[in-house]
Image (cartoon, rainbow, N blue to C red):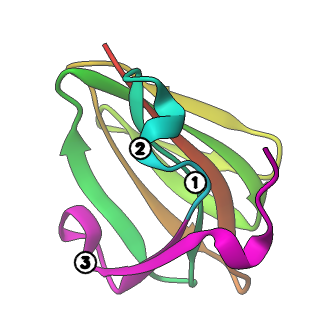
Amino acid sequence: MVKHFDDFEVEVVQNLKDGKGYVTIIRLFEEEDFLGKGKLFGKAIIKPGNSIGYHQHKGDQEAYYILDGHAMYNDNGKEVFLEPGDLTICKPGEFHSIEAIGDEDLEFLMLILYE
């Protein structure tokens, strides 16, 4: 199977998880692509100053792989600076948030898999 850029669903979400501004999500997988094991594999783009709000994962885990830009990541109450090449994993029961900082867009891959 091959998917071209025009085939992907693009979603703009305002105040994702009570975050600031909006997040653009390019969904790379359709529901059937997960074989029942997950719900999101995509690329997120966040403008400087915008964010995904602090939230808990229940029954799933989420990973972020930073492609471009810089972020302040809240890992269970601890703030950590992220740059390209960094990976985060928020396991079931844990909390996290992410905010784009600096002058350029934050771009990262996001993956949510079921527990």
Which corner quadrant holds the N terminus? top right
Q: For the residue carrying disc 3, how many other residues have a C-alpha within 10 Å: few (<14), some (14-19), or many (20+)?
A: some
Check the image and name the residue furthest to the top. 115
Q: Residue at x 31, y 31 (%)?
A: 76
Locate the C terminus and report the quarter of the image it occupies: top left
Mark 3 / mark 1, whichever is N-terminal: 3
- The x, y position of residue 36, in whole percent, is 37, 23
Frontmost residue, 15 versus 111: 111
Q: Which residue is mark 2?
A: 31
Which residues are the magenta region?
1-26
The three-letter amino acid code for the residue at tag 2 is: Glu
| Residue 38 position (above or below residue 28) | above
Q: Is residue 85 above or below residue 38?
A: below
* Secondary structure category for the residue under label 1: strand
- Residue in view at x 82 percent, y 52 percent: 2
- Note whether 31 is above or below 112 in the view shown: below
Residue flagged by tag 1: what amino acid is it?
A: Gly
Q: CA distance from mark 3 to mark 1?
A: 18 Å
* Above or below 18: residue 66: above
The amino acid beneath tag 3 is: Asn
